[in-house]
Amino acid sequence: MKRNRYSQEFKLQVIKEALETGNKSAVARRYEIASNMLHRWIREYNEGQFGEVSLDSVSSLEAKTLAQENEQLKKLLGEQALELAILRDLVKKKNPHLLKKLK
């Protein structure tokens, strides 16, 4: 059987996803690794055996991009809500008999 070696970055990514989702078995299947291996990596991470690199440092690097993406999504959602309100008003004005169906 072939033995795989995984980089520390890959391990941290998998550990982060498993801790966020709470479903370790599904994450292990997704990355095609044994669930026992993932449980061992999580245990080692909690014991501090991954050195100075932690999930906090990985998260801080992604925090800016996530915040920017979040702001873009909020703007897009606001624009869509405004468009929907405008379209509903137009339908009400041109077709008052459809007003009952909208509610």
Image (cartoon, rainbow, N blue to C red):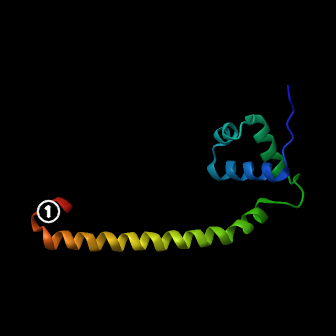
Residue 76 in view: yes
Q: Give the quadrant of residue 31.
A: top right
How many marks are shown on the rendered structure? 1
Residue 66: x percent and y percent?
A: 63, 67
Q: Horizontally, is 85 left or right of 21 in the view?
A: left
Q: Residue at x 76, y 62 (%)?
A: 58
Where is the N terminus found, in terms of image quarters?
Answer: top right
- In x, y percent, where is residue 40? 81, 41
Residue at 56% x, 69% y is 70
Q: Quadrant of the C terminus?
A: bottom left
- The image shows residue 51, relative to residue 38, as above or below, that is below
Q: Which residue lies furthest to the left in this view?
A: 97
Q: Can residue 103 be seen by looking at this rendering?
A: no
Left or right of 73 in this view: 85: left
Farthest front residue?
A: 94
At 89% from the left and 51% from the top, the residue drawn is 49
Q: Using the image, determine if residue 78 lies above or below residue 35.
A: below
> Which secondary structure, mark 1?
helix
Name the residue tied to disc 1: 98
* In the foreground, 65 or 90: 90
Across and down, in percent, residue 15 comes to 74, 49
Q: Quadrant of residue 29?
A: top right
Single out the residue that lies furthest toward the top: 1
